[in-house]
Image (tube, grey):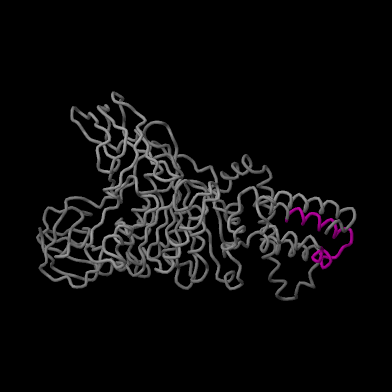
């Protein structure tokens, strides 16, 4: 046991700590505040405290636990709400009320609730690390698959079917001549990546329901992406949309240093929303980590790693998991504050010199993998982090370090926000390195013309950007008819396809097949309009055709009526080539 020697904000230096280890969890002060050793020098330990240190005095005791920070994994995680160090906020409310107290301890998993365990192996079977030995129906959407912990294995001596708490023995394993009990819960170091057999190429589309992402800049299952943007560009709404509608088996939302009212809005809205694929409550496939801006800053880093450890755990069951972190800039700011208090040599703009490597340890834990154990299965963990560059300056260190790591960028534009174009993803600055691999999925699952339609849309938008300078100088009237027609089609792509309302009951989520038909219809109208223009019709007349507003209403058409609506549009466009009217 040591004692406090110095206190500097969230950093505490304790003496008489010889024999401690780096990243060991310690109890600090009389109130036993949770802390973690981040540095050792002779008999002194540098501790970052995950709670408010106001009132701590020199000489108060510091007691080591002998363990590093562990994440509790087992039934009861889905639908739960945690703080930055995996204390259940739901349990806290039941125990102490709406206001949190310093030093309070709660378990991540309910120790009293019983779960129905159904074994899938029998006594006498030999199992190895990662093998699934049974299942627990955790929610209507998640079947919790109980796995042999990593590093364990042997012969099953006994296994029981029935209702158990997470601490009850469900099976006994003979391992090197010893009897080892297995429970529904296992623990894993939050900072250590979980093991897998091998990494696989990301080839399947992560369906988010956001058209500009799914179609123009697709993200693959197991990929990693960043969403940088200035204040008011809609980062939080974009991440909420992904956490709400992404067609993965499990979604994890980490509010890292976010405003409390935004986190409250997320928690409130998810209680009412339903999964579009199953029509069950979205809360049955979500885990929330609420580490708001008024909570201790040092908990921001560990909240990120606890979230990604949970994602890897469900990935190892064979699930596709999405983790969204809002925002990694708040985490980087916490690292800068801790670095300053430790008097570390600062890097660019005061951030620590290890900023890039620390970000990489988070993003690189994403991936699509072949899981350990039997039965053979694959799972994926997709990571999306938002970045909040001050003044929307993408040249600042956090954004630049993130761009060197991720493979997809969704750049949010202040100018688009000012024009009320949402989502504000700039189609000229964004990119995805998954376009080719995911394009095969589009061709097989949706339509073989995906690449042709996507490329034509991108070329049209690029050409529009090149013409904007001329339009600003001389006006659109000075352009030739073919350029004016291109501007018309580009405007339809922007307003009728790229713009999408997160609050409209129909437009908020677009399945891939619907998105393809929407863009293909606009491209087809462009071909028809070009032929009409060659027949002598002016672009000003084409823009007044009745079919133009009908195309703009595609996004509001209910799903059950959509196919007929599109079929009628295409039929009327074909008639227009011969009659120059045909419902146009």
Task: For the C terminus, give its image quadrant.
Answer: bottom right
Q: Is residue 120 left or right of residue 35?
A: right
Residue 551 point in image, percent of width and height: 73, 59
- Residue in the picture at 38% in, 62% down: 256
Segment colored magenta: 522-545
Q: Main SS of the magenta segment?
A: helix
- Residue in the picture at 9% in, 60% down: 16
Is 13 situated above or below 574? below
Residue 537 point in image, percent of width and height: 87, 63
- For the residue pair 125 and 95, the one nearer the viewer reads as 95
- For the residue pair 248 and 9, the one nearer the viewer reads as 248
Task: For the N terminus, give its image quadrant.
Answer: bottom left
Q: Is residue 366 left or right of residue 434?
A: left
Residue 223 point in image, percent of width and height: 48, 49
Residue 523 painted magenta = yes
Residue 131 point in image, percent of width and height: 35, 33
Residue 60 painted magenta = no
Q: Residue furthest top?
A: 124
Q: How many marks?
A: 0
């Amino acid at each position: 046991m040591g004692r406090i020697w110095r206190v500097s904000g969230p950093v505490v230096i304790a003496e008489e700590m010889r024999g401690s280890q780096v990243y060991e969890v310690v109890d600090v002060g009389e109130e036993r505040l949770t802390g973690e050793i981040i540095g050792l020098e002779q008999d002194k330990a540098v501790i970052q405290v995950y709670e408010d240190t106001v009132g701590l005095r020199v000489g108060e005791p510091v007691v080591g636990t002998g363990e590093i920070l562990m994440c509790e994994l087992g039934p009861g995680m889905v639908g739960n709400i945690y703080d930055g160090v995996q204390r259940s906020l739901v349990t806290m409310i039941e125990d102490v009320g709406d206001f949190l107290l310093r030093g309070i301890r709660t378990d991540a998993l309910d120790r009293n609730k019983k779960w129905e365990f159904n074994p899938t192996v029998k006594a006498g079977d030999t199992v190895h690390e990662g093998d699934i030995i049974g299942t627990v129906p955790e929610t209507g959407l998640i079947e919790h698959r109980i796995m042999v912990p990593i590093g364990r294995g042997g012969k099953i001596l006994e296994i029981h079917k029935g209702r158990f708490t997470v601490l009850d023995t469900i099976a006994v394993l003979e391992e090197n001549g010893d009897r080892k009990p297995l429970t529904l819960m296992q623990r894993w170091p939050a900072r250590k990546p979980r093991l897998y057999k091998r990494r696989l190429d990301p080839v399947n589309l992560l369906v988010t329901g956001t058209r500009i992402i799914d179609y123009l800049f697709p993200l693959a299952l197991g990929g990693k992406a960043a969403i940088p943007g200035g204040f008011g560009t809609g980062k939080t709404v974009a991440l909420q949309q992904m956490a709400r509608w992404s067609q993965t088996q499990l979604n994890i939302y980490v509010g890292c240093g976010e405003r409390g009212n935004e986190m409250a809005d997320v928690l409130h809205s998810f209680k009412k929303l339903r999964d579009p694929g199953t029509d069950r409550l979205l809360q049955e496939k979500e885990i929330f980590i609420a580490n708001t801006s008024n909570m201790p800053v040092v908990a921001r880093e560990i909240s990120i790693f606890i979230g990604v450890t949970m994602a890897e755990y469900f990935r190892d069951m064979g699930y596709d998991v999405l983790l969204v972190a809002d925002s990694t800039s708040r985490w980087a700011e916490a690292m800068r504050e801790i670095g300053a208090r430790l008097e570390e040599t600062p890097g660019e703009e005061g951030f620590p010199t290890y900023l890039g490597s620390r970000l990489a340890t988070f993003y690189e834990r994403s991936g699509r993998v072949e899981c350990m154990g039997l039965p053979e299965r694959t799972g994926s963990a997709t990571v999306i982090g938002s970045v909040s560059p001050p003044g929307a300056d993408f040249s600042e260190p956090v954004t630049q370090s993130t761009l060197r790591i991720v493979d997809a960028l969704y750049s949010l534009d202040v100018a688009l926000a000012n024009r009320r174009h949402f989502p504000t993803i700039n189609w000229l600055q964004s990119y995805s390195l998954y376009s080719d691999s995911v394009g095969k999925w589009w061709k097989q699952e949706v339509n073989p013309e995906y690449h042709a339609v996507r490329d034509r849309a991108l070329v049209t938008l690029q050409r529009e950007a090149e013409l904007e300078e001329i339009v600003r100088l001389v006006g659109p009237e000075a352009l030739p008819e073919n350029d004016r027609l291109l501007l018309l089609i580009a405007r339809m792509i922007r307003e009728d396809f790229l713009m999408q309302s997160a609050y409209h009951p129909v437009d908020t989520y677009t399945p891939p097949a619907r998105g393809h038909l929407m863009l293909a219809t606009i491209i087809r109208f462009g071909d028809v309009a070009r032929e009409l223009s060659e027949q002598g019709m002016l672009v000003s007349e084409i823009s007044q055709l009745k079919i133009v507003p009908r195309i703009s209403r595609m996004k509001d058409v209910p799903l059950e009526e959509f196919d007929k609506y599109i079929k009628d549009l295409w039929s009327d466009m074909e008639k227009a080539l011969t009659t120059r009217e045909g419902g146009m």
